[in-house]
Amino acid sequence: MPPANSLFRTVLRLAKSPALMAYAISGSVAVASFLSTFLLARISGAAVIGHYALAISTVNLLASLALFGLDRILIRQVAGDLREGASGQARAAIGAIAGRVGLMALAVSILWLLVLFFTGLNDWLEGDFLSMALVGAGILVVPFLRLGYSAIRANGMPVLGQFFEALPTLLLPLAFVSLWLAGEAPGEALATGLVIGFQALATLGSWLLMAPRIRAWDEGRDIPAGLLWTGTPLMAGLFLQQLTDWVILAKISSSMDAADVGAFRVSFQVITIILTIVMTSETYVAPRIAGDVRVGRYDLVWRRHRRATALMAVLASPVVLVSLLAPGWLLETAFGPEFAVAATALAIMAVGQVVHVARGPLGAMLTMAGHDGVQLKLTILGVVVGLVASLTLIPLYGLTGAALSQALPLVVRGLGAWIMARRLIPRHAVGEGSGLQP
């Protein structure tokens, strides 16, 4: 048995670990997100959640289009520049990326509002018009929030970056509780507006934190040729992934009713706990992997992958087991009897998450190692599977078909990413300064 002082030092070292802090924030986000859905379900019902989920899904879809994959490029470029002491290069990259994203966000927001006001899309979706109009504001806010916390992470502060990413989610249940205590039931438009407002607050905070640090760097230099276009595969990949999720909600909304969308959204909220764990691992290790790749330390890249995967499996296993073994009990107990209709859907999506967790942070590995094209091809394959499944299975099997449409692309992408990472990323160090290729 180790001496008491040695055990104490070990506990103290773990308590100070940035990784532990990152997962603590991740756990808080998962709890807050679950609590927000619980409160909205109990206070306002399934139909409100259905409209709210469609609006937020649309924000995320179109914001990814405006962002153009440049948040990941910012992490890769800036983290590598700072590791090499080229702060001027990092400063120029942030400025150029922010300018491009601003123009794209404005264009996408205007285009969305024109489509909303002058076409019948919202009637087909049976969405809440005010909530869908607020999507235009979300498109302007979300890309800059993602750039802000990505810049913080690239600057060597992953926990702070994660805090600003988590802040809107942490504030939302507090707002719902306050409304409940005041005797108000939040509608879909108010819930959507609160999310976007909290995202705007987090955006402001993240850039206020980074602004003095960026000013302290060297004067900006010319950015690498083609930098602003290197995010295209990432943008396309993320957009297509989110398009699959959006099509599922849209198909349910157009062929069933808002309550069915709400039930599916609640079941997916349980799955989001697992997704949060996976995303936390990827975002935490991504800047470190970028630095390891820059100096050819692929052995460290795979070591980080193994450790992150093991931790993800431990943290996700309770949610996976409950979702597989007692999905109906979980949905009915936590959210109410009207949500138990999605029990089978929850169990199916949990199976997909088993594969997602088992693959580990392969997305961060492939991206930070410069294999964006591979990521895009895998994403396109997954999207094709998801869209075909959505269009064929949802009309036949309802929510069960929707769950299959969500789970099958994860399995396809997960297996494909594992095969490609083993083929493309060396397992041993290849020497400092060797670049991306061994």
Image (cartoon, helix red, strand yellow):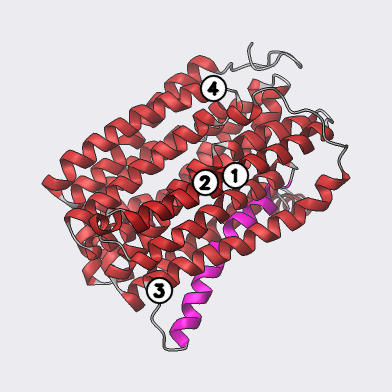
Q: Residues within 10 Å of mark 3 (few under 14, many from 20)?
A: many
Q: Are marks 1 and 3 in contact (CB under 8 Å)?
A: no
Question: Residue 151, image x and y in percent?
Answer: 69, 44
Q: Earlier in the sequence, mark 4 or mark 1?
A: 1
Q: Earlier in the sequence, mark 4 or mark 3?
A: 3
The quarter of the picture where residue 266 lies is bottom left
Query: In the image, which disc is placed on residue 175?
Result: none
Circle 4 or circle 3, nearest the eye: 4
Mark 1 sits on what residue?
103
Residue 326 in view in this figure: no
User: Is residue 173 inside the magenta stretch?
Assistant: yes
The amino acid on which the numbered mark 1 sits, given as a three-letter code, is Leu
**Alpha carbons under labels 1 and 3: distance apart:** 37 Å
**Alpha carbons under labels 4 and 2: distance apart:** 29 Å
The amino acid on which the numbered mark 2 sits, given as a three-letter code, is Ala
Question: Residue 78, image x and y in percent?
Answer: 72, 35
Instruction: Say which residue appears at 55% left-offset and 43% top-offset.
Output: 104
Question: Residue most toward the top?
Answer: 438
The quarter of the picture where residue 351 lies is top left
Q: Earlier in the sequence, mark 2 or mark 3?
A: 3
The amino acid on which the numbered mark 4 sits, given as a three-letter code, is His
Magenta stretch: helix, strand or loop mostly: helix
Residue 185 lies, with reference to residue 325, above or below; the image says below
Q: Residues within 10 Å of mark 4 (few under 14, many from 20)?
A: some
Mark 3 sits on what residue?
39
Question: Residue 365, image x and y in percent?
Answer: 56, 29
**Alpha carbons under labels 4 and 3: distance apart:** 42 Å
> Number of labelled discs?
4
**Alpha carbons under labels 4 and 1: distance apart:** 27 Å
